[in-house]
Amino acid sequence: MSQPTPPTKIFVSHSHHEREIAGAIKDELNRFGGLAFVAHEDINPTEEWKSALLRNLRECDVFLALLSGNFASSEWTDQESGIAVALGKVIVPVKVNLDPYGFIGKYQALRWDFEEPKLSLGKLVKVLFEKKQLTVEGLIRGFAESYSYDDAGLNAELLGSGISFSKTQIDEVVKASMLNSQIFASFSAKPLLDKLFSAYSDMIKPELMKKWKDR
Protein backbone atom coordinates (compact mmCIF):
# COMPACT_ATOMS: atom_id res chain seq x y z
CA MET A 1 0.00 0.00 0.00
CA SER A 2 1.50 3.33 -1.09
CA GLN A 3 2.10 6.04 1.46
CA PRO A 4 0.12 9.30 1.08
CA THR A 5 2.01 12.15 -0.54
CA PRO A 6 3.20 14.59 2.15
CA PRO A 7 1.76 18.10 1.78
CA THR A 8 3.75 20.70 -0.10
CA LYS A 9 5.31 23.18 2.33
CA ILE A 10 4.83 26.78 1.22
CA PHE A 11 6.70 29.69 2.81
CA VAL A 12 4.64 32.90 2.47
CA SER A 13 7.09 35.81 2.61
CA HIS A 14 5.40 39.12 3.32
CA SER A 15 5.44 42.41 5.17
CA HIS A 16 3.19 42.53 8.23
CA HIS A 17 1.15 45.15 6.34
CA GLU A 18 -0.04 42.33 4.05
CA ARG A 19 -0.85 39.90 6.85
CA GLU A 20 -4.54 39.69 5.88
CA ILE A 21 -3.66 38.60 2.33
CA ALA A 22 -1.07 36.19 3.71
CA GLY A 23 -3.65 34.70 6.07
CA ALA A 24 -6.19 34.26 3.27
CA ILE A 25 -3.58 32.55 1.11
CA LYS A 26 -2.60 30.24 3.95
CA ASP A 27 -6.21 29.18 4.57
CA GLU A 28 -6.86 28.56 0.87
CA LEU A 29 -3.69 26.59 0.19
CA ASN A 30 -4.16 24.48 3.30
CA ARG A 31 -7.70 23.67 2.13
CA PHE A 32 -6.29 22.39 -1.17
CA GLY A 33 -3.70 20.14 0.42
CA GLY A 34 -0.77 22.52 0.93
CA LEU A 35 0.91 23.40 4.22
CA ALA A 36 1.54 27.14 4.27
CA PHE A 37 3.82 28.89 6.75
CA VAL A 38 2.99 32.52 7.63
CA ALA A 39 5.50 33.91 10.11
CA HIS A 40 3.22 36.18 12.14
CA GLU A 41 0.84 33.25 12.75
CA ASP A 42 3.16 30.29 12.89
CA ILE A 43 6.22 31.33 14.90
CA ASN A 44 5.79 30.39 18.53
CA PRO A 45 6.51 33.45 20.71
CA THR A 46 8.98 31.38 22.77
CA GLU A 47 11.02 30.44 19.68
CA GLU A 48 14.04 32.40 18.55
CA TRP A 49 12.35 33.81 15.46
CA LYS A 50 15.34 34.00 13.13
CA SER A 51 16.01 30.31 13.66
CA ALA A 52 12.34 29.54 13.01
CA LEU A 53 12.38 31.52 9.75
CA LEU A 54 15.58 29.85 8.54
CA ARG A 55 14.29 26.39 9.44
CA ASN A 56 11.04 26.93 7.56
CA LEU A 57 12.91 28.38 4.57
CA ARG A 58 15.13 25.30 4.43
CA GLU A 59 12.19 22.91 4.78
CA CYS A 60 9.75 24.57 2.37
CA ASP A 61 9.12 23.39 -1.19
CA VAL A 62 7.71 26.69 -2.46
CA PHE A 63 8.69 30.28 -1.71
CA LEU A 64 5.70 32.58 -2.26
CA ALA A 65 6.48 36.31 -2.10
CA LEU A 66 3.76 38.94 -1.58
CA LEU A 67 5.40 41.78 -3.49
CA SER A 68 4.53 45.29 -2.35
CA GLY A 69 6.24 48.52 -1.45
CA ASN A 70 6.11 47.30 2.13
CA PHE A 71 7.83 44.06 1.10
CA ALA A 72 10.66 46.01 -0.56
CA SER A 73 11.19 48.23 2.50
CA SER A 74 11.15 45.32 4.96
CA GLU A 75 14.43 44.48 6.64
CA TRP A 76 14.10 40.72 6.11
CA THR A 77 12.06 39.86 3.02
CA ASP A 78 14.84 40.47 0.48
CA GLN A 79 17.09 38.20 2.54
CA GLU A 80 14.37 35.54 2.55
CA SER A 81 14.12 35.83 -1.25
CA GLY A 82 17.87 35.44 -1.68
CA ILE A 83 17.99 32.39 0.57
CA ALA A 84 15.05 30.77 -1.26
CA VAL A 85 16.71 31.29 -4.66
CA ALA A 86 20.05 29.98 -3.35
CA LEU A 87 18.31 26.87 -1.99
CA GLY A 88 16.61 26.22 -5.34
CA LYS A 89 13.04 26.55 -4.09
CA VAL A 90 10.07 26.86 -6.46
CA ILE A 91 9.50 30.63 -6.63
CA VAL A 92 5.97 32.06 -6.96
CA PRO A 93 5.76 35.87 -6.80
CA VAL A 94 2.37 37.48 -6.17
CA LYS A 95 2.18 41.12 -7.25
CA VAL A 96 0.30 43.16 -4.66
CA ASN A 97 1.53 46.49 -6.07
CA LEU A 98 5.13 45.75 -7.05
CA ASP A 99 6.72 43.81 -9.92
CA PRO A 100 9.32 41.10 -9.20
CA TYR A 101 12.79 42.54 -8.63
CA GLY A 102 16.22 41.60 -7.37
CA PHE A 103 16.76 37.90 -6.68
CA ILE A 104 13.33 36.99 -8.07
CA GLY A 105 13.18 39.59 -10.86
CA LYS A 106 13.15 36.97 -13.64
CA TYR A 107 9.97 35.25 -12.41
CA GLN A 108 6.49 35.95 -13.77
CA ALA A 109 4.16 37.28 -11.07
CA LEU A 110 0.52 36.49 -10.43
CA ARG A 111 -1.37 39.76 -9.88
CA TRP A 112 -3.42 40.07 -6.70
CA ASP A 113 -6.88 41.50 -7.45
CA PHE A 114 -8.22 43.40 -4.43
CA GLU A 115 -11.72 43.55 -5.96
CA GLU A 116 -11.82 39.79 -6.65
CA PRO A 117 -9.53 38.14 -4.07
CA LYS A 118 -11.26 34.78 -4.47
CA LEU A 119 -10.37 34.75 -8.17
CA SER A 120 -6.77 35.52 -7.25
CA LEU A 121 -6.73 32.62 -4.79
CA GLY A 122 -8.14 30.30 -7.44
CA LYS A 123 -5.46 31.34 -9.93
CA LEU A 124 -2.80 30.74 -7.30
CA VAL A 125 -4.10 27.24 -6.61
CA LYS A 126 -4.05 26.52 -10.35
CA VAL A 127 -0.49 27.84 -10.75
CA LEU A 128 0.74 25.64 -7.92
CA PHE A 129 -1.04 22.63 -9.39
CA GLU A 130 0.52 23.29 -12.81
CA LYS A 131 3.91 23.48 -11.09
CA LYS A 132 3.14 20.05 -9.56
CA GLN A 133 3.10 21.50 -6.05
CA LEU A 134 -0.54 20.54 -5.39
CA THR A 135 -2.11 17.19 -6.22
CA VAL A 136 -5.37 16.12 -7.86
CA GLU A 137 -6.39 14.71 -4.47
CA GLY A 138 -5.75 18.11 -2.92
CA LEU A 139 -7.91 19.83 -5.51
CA ILE A 140 -10.72 17.36 -4.88
CA ARG A 141 -10.44 17.96 -1.14
CA GLY A 142 -10.69 21.72 -1.62
CA PHE A 143 -13.67 21.24 -3.92
CA ALA A 144 -15.38 18.97 -1.39
CA GLU A 145 -15.01 21.72 1.23
CA SER A 146 -16.64 24.42 -0.93
CA TYR A 147 -18.24 26.85 1.50
CA SER A 148 -20.62 28.81 -0.74
CA TYR A 149 -22.42 28.55 -4.08
CA ASP A 150 -19.91 30.91 -5.69
CA ASP A 151 -16.97 29.04 -4.19
CA ALA A 152 -18.39 25.77 -5.52
CA GLY A 153 -18.68 27.28 -8.99
CA LEU A 154 -15.08 28.50 -9.00
CA ASN A 155 -13.83 25.16 -7.70
CA ALA A 156 -15.86 23.25 -10.29
CA GLU A 157 -14.31 25.45 -12.96
CA LEU A 158 -10.86 24.53 -11.65
CA LEU A 159 -11.65 20.79 -11.80
CA GLY A 160 -12.87 21.17 -15.37
CA SER A 161 -9.74 22.95 -16.59
CA GLY A 162 -8.08 19.98 -18.28
CA ILE A 163 -7.25 17.88 -15.22
CA SER A 164 -7.06 14.13 -15.77
CA PHE A 165 -8.84 12.01 -13.17
CA SER A 166 -8.58 8.33 -12.35
CA LYS A 167 -11.76 6.29 -11.86
CA THR A 168 -11.43 6.56 -8.08
CA GLN A 169 -10.82 10.31 -8.25
CA ILE A 170 -13.78 11.14 -10.50
CA ASP A 171 -16.05 9.02 -8.28
CA GLU A 172 -14.83 11.10 -5.33
CA VAL A 173 -15.74 14.28 -7.19
CA VAL A 174 -19.28 12.98 -7.82
CA LYS A 175 -19.66 11.94 -4.16
CA ALA A 176 -18.47 15.35 -2.97
CA SER A 177 -20.92 17.03 -5.33
CA MET A 178 -23.78 15.06 -3.80
CA LEU A 179 -22.79 15.44 -0.15
CA ASN A 180 -22.13 19.19 -0.08
CA SER A 181 -25.30 21.27 -0.49
CA GLN A 182 -23.24 24.29 -1.49
CA ILE A 183 -22.12 22.31 -4.54
CA PHE A 184 -25.22 20.49 -5.73
CA ALA A 185 -27.40 23.60 -5.25
CA SER A 186 -24.95 25.92 -7.00
CA PHE A 187 -26.29 27.21 -10.32
CA SER A 188 -22.77 28.09 -11.47
CA ALA A 189 -21.29 24.68 -10.55
CA LYS A 190 -24.04 22.51 -12.05
CA PRO A 191 -23.38 23.00 -15.80
CA LEU A 192 -19.64 22.69 -15.25
CA LEU A 193 -20.07 19.43 -13.37
CA ASP A 194 -22.59 18.11 -15.90
CA LYS A 195 -19.98 18.64 -18.60
CA LEU A 196 -17.21 17.08 -16.54
CA PHE A 197 -19.25 14.02 -15.56
CA SER A 198 -20.44 13.56 -19.13
CA ALA A 199 -16.82 13.39 -20.27
CA TYR A 200 -16.14 10.69 -17.66
CA SER A 201 -19.47 8.88 -17.92
CA ASP A 202 -17.79 5.60 -18.90
CA MET A 203 -15.65 5.65 -15.74
CA ILE A 204 -18.11 6.88 -13.12
CA LYS A 205 -20.01 4.21 -11.18
CA PRO A 206 -23.50 3.93 -12.74
CA GLU A 207 -25.24 4.28 -9.37
CA LEU A 208 -23.36 7.53 -8.68
CA MET A 209 -24.15 8.89 -12.14
CA LYS A 210 -27.84 8.08 -11.63
CA LYS A 211 -27.92 9.80 -8.25
CA TRP A 212 -26.35 12.91 -9.77
CA LYS A 213 -28.86 13.01 -12.61
CA ASP A 214 -31.80 12.37 -10.28
CA ARG A 215 -30.81 14.83 -7.56
Image (cartoon, grey):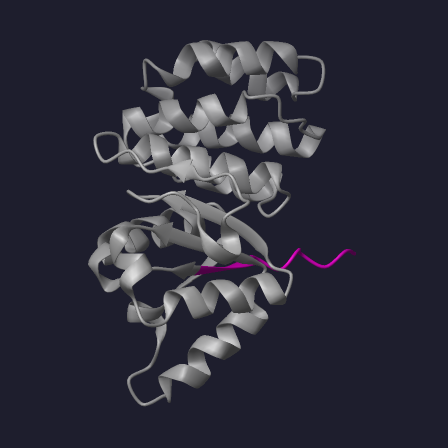
User: Which residue is at the front of the view, 74 or 132?
Assistant: 74
Q: Is residue 8 above or below residue 164?
A: below
Whether residue 112 is situated above or below residue 165 in the rendered picture: below
> Does the rendering let one see residue 156?
yes
Q: Is residue 65 magenta?
A: no
Q: Quadrant of the N terminus?
A: bottom right
What is the x, y in percent for residue 87?
A: 63, 67
Q: Is residue 181 visible?
A: no
User: Secondary structure of the magenta portion, mostly?
Assistant: loop
- Residue 119, position in %: x, y? 34, 30
Relative vertical location of residue 15 with respect to residue 147 in this rendering, above or below: below
- Residue for point 28% across, 63% down: 73
Count all numbered tags in the image, as a single digit. Answer: 0
Identified at 47% across, 45% down, the residue is: 32
Q: Residue at x 31, y 54 (%)?
A: 22
Left or right of 132, for residue 47: left
Left or right placement of residue 205 versus residue 34 in this view: right
Magenta region, residue range = 1-11
Q: Quadrant of residue 201?
A: top right
Report the quarter where the C terminus lies: top left
Residue 174 image position (x, y, % from top left): 53, 25
Residue 48, position in %: x, y?
37, 89
Residue found at the very far front of the displayed protein: 102
Q: Identify the residue at horizontal 38%, vertical 46% (top origin).
A: 28
Image position of 176 with respect to 128: above or below: above
- Residue farthest right in this picture: 1
Front residue of 161 and 171: 161
Q: Which corner quadrant of the image does residue 146 belong to?
A: top left
